[in-house]
Image (spheres, rainbow, N blue to C red):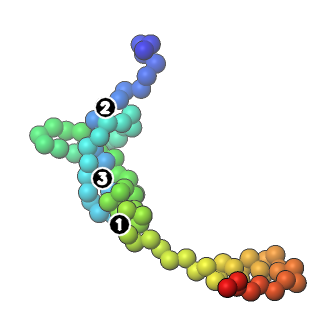
Amino acid sequence: MKPDIHPDYHPVVFQDATTGKTFLTRSTITSDRTIDWEGQTYPLVMVDVTADSHPFWTGGNRILDKAGQVEKFRKRYGDGGRQYTSRT
C-alpha cells in the first residue's frame, strides 16, 4: 500500500440510540465523544438503527396497507376502463 493516502482505521464504539446497546468495531469515522470500554477509552458514535433495533432483525416489520396503495394508484392513474377481478 502507498503511505499517507489511507484514512486512519481505528477501534470505535457504536451505540444504538434506541436500545442503548454498544459494540466495538473498527472504522475510519471520528467523534468528539468518548466511552470507556473494558478499561480503554474509544471514540463513541451514536447511530439510529443497528441490528438490535432494526425492524427486519427484531421481527417488528411494519404492515403495509396494500389495499390503500392500490386505490391510491387507481385514483392517480385511473384503471383504463378495465375491471380487475381475482383469478381462481
Q: Nearer the viewer, residue 50 or 47?
A: 50
User: Which amino acid type corresponds to the residue marked 2 in the rendered image?
Assistant: His
Q: Which mark is residue 87?
A: none
Residue highlighted by disc 1: 58
The residue that appears at 83% across and 80% down in the rendered structure is 78
Which residue is situated farthest in the right direction here?
81
Q: Nearer the viewer, residue 27 or 71?
A: 71
Residue contact at pointers 3 and 2, CB within 8 angstroms: no
Which residue is situated farthest in the front direction here?
88
Number of other residues with Cα within 10 Å of mark 2, as a class: few under 14, some 14 to 19, many 20 or more: few
- Res 43 quadrant in image: top left
Residue highlighted by disc 2: 10
Q: CA distance from mark 3 to mark 2?
A: 16 Å
Q: Position of residue 85 (x, y in %)?
A: 74, 86
Is 31 situated above or below 67?
A: above
The residue that appears at 42% across and 64% down in the rendered structure is 56
Q: Secondary structure at mark 2?
A: strand
The residue that appears at 77% across and 84% down in the rendered structure is 84
- Res 19 quadrant in image: bottom left
Task: Please state if 66 lies on the left or on the right of 10 as rendered.
Answer: right
Number of other residues with Cα within 10 Å of mark 3, as a class: few under 14, some 14 to 19, many 20 or more: some
Q: Nearer the viewer, residue 61 or 86?
A: 86
Of tags 3 and 1, the one toward the viewer is 1
Q: Secondary structure at mark 1?
A: helix
User: Which amino acid type corresponds to the residue marked 1 in the rendered image?
Assistant: Thr
Task: Please state if 41 lies on the left or on the right of 50 as rendered.
Answer: left
Residue highlighted by disc 3: 15
